[in-house]
Amino acid sequence: MADPSQVGRLVESMKRAVSIPVTVKSRIGIEGKGMSPKSDYEDLRSFTQTMVEAGCDGLIVHARIAVLGGLNPAENRTVPPLRYDDVYALKAEYPELPIELNGGLRTLEEMHRHLHDGLDGIMVGRAAYETPRILGFIDSILDPACQLEDSMQAREKSDHSHLIHVLDRMHGYILNRFEEGVPPSRIVRHMLGLFHGLPGARRIRQKLSGKWYAGLDNRMLLGRYLADVFRELTEFEPVSSKS
Ligand SMILES: Cc1cc2nc3c(=O)[nH]c(=O)nc-3n(C[C@H](O)[C@H](O)[C@H](O)COP(=O)(O)O)c2cc1C
């Protein structure tokens, strides 16, 4: 964002080279490293204008400034305050340009609200990784009339069956990759969010962290261990990996 013309030239070149949409993901502004402060809405508006003139097909806006030099990447995802209003103001000025909101969306309720409040889409980062079971409900929030509160019971029931299904697929996948030499921890550590919020999740995370797979040196032993751990939280019975 420090050099909007350069980004515009990149967009133009990409547009010439491909036939798929070319979109730009940006913050609402940048600040630091001796640059002039780029945290004003006016800078975002002028950046957007440059993108539109370059032929950009849409913007995904992380609704925070980035502080260059002062904050590390993780801090840059939490410390600068969220300014959703700037993204809505931009959409009001550029009704023809598809604009998606990103940053800090955690709950299905928030996602549903922003998805149907005049923007063209939302992007969810950390919540999808840390609480991946929310992805099982994404279809329902696409419906503007969806009453999330009312369908809570049905959601919990389908949440459970989604989880069993995902665990079953992952169980088979881990065992197959294990036979190709992939350490199971490399896959399992990215699954721990699946158990988020379930009673006993902490114990499961402990059982699947560190060197838990030492000694599980064949498919059968590994498969049994994983099935036992998964069963502690669910009625998990492996189906896909029986062969
Ligand atoms: C581990 C991690 C890796 C990321 N990698 C990228 C990336 O390669 N490109 C990108 O545009 N954003 C990346 N992001 C930023 C996210 O796309 C998103 O803008 C940011 O996490 C804020 O959204 P959230 O609050 O929903 O997580 C990454 C975020 C995380 C946590």
Image: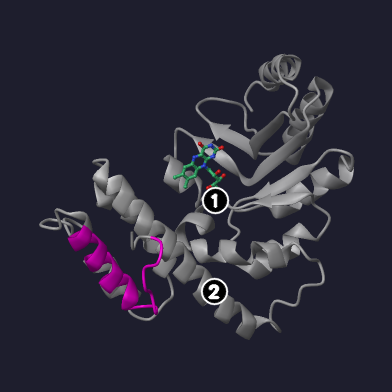
Name the amino acid, label 2. Asp
Q: Position of residue 59 (x, y in %)?
A: 73, 37
Whole-angstrom CA distance, mark 2 to mark 1, is 20 Å
- Residue 230 can be seen in this image: yes
Horizontally, is 143 left or right of 102 in the view? Answer: right
Looking at this view, is 112 or 20 the one in front? Answer: 20
| Point 57% across, 34% down: residue | 31
Name the amino acid, label 1. Gly
Name the residue carrying label 1.
125
Horizontally, is 118 left or right of 204 in the view? Answer: right
Confirm if mark 1 falls within 8 A of ligand 1: yes
Q: Residues within 10 Å of mark 2 (few under 14, many from 20)?
A: some
Looking at this view, is 198 or 240 the one in front? Answer: 240
Q: How many marks?
A: 2
Q: Which mark is residue 159?
A: 2
Q: Which mark is residue 150?
A: none
Judged from this view, the residue extending furthest toward the left is: 215
Which quarter of the rendered picture does the C terminus lie within?
A: bottom left
Q: Quadrant of residue 196?
A: bottom left
Q: Residues within 10 Å of mark 1 (few under 14, many from 20)?
A: few
Please state the extent of the stretch shown in magenta in the rendering: 220-240
Confirm if mark 2 falls within 8 A of ligand 1: no
Comes first in the chain, label 2 or label 1 = 1
Label 1 sits on a secondary structure element that is: loop
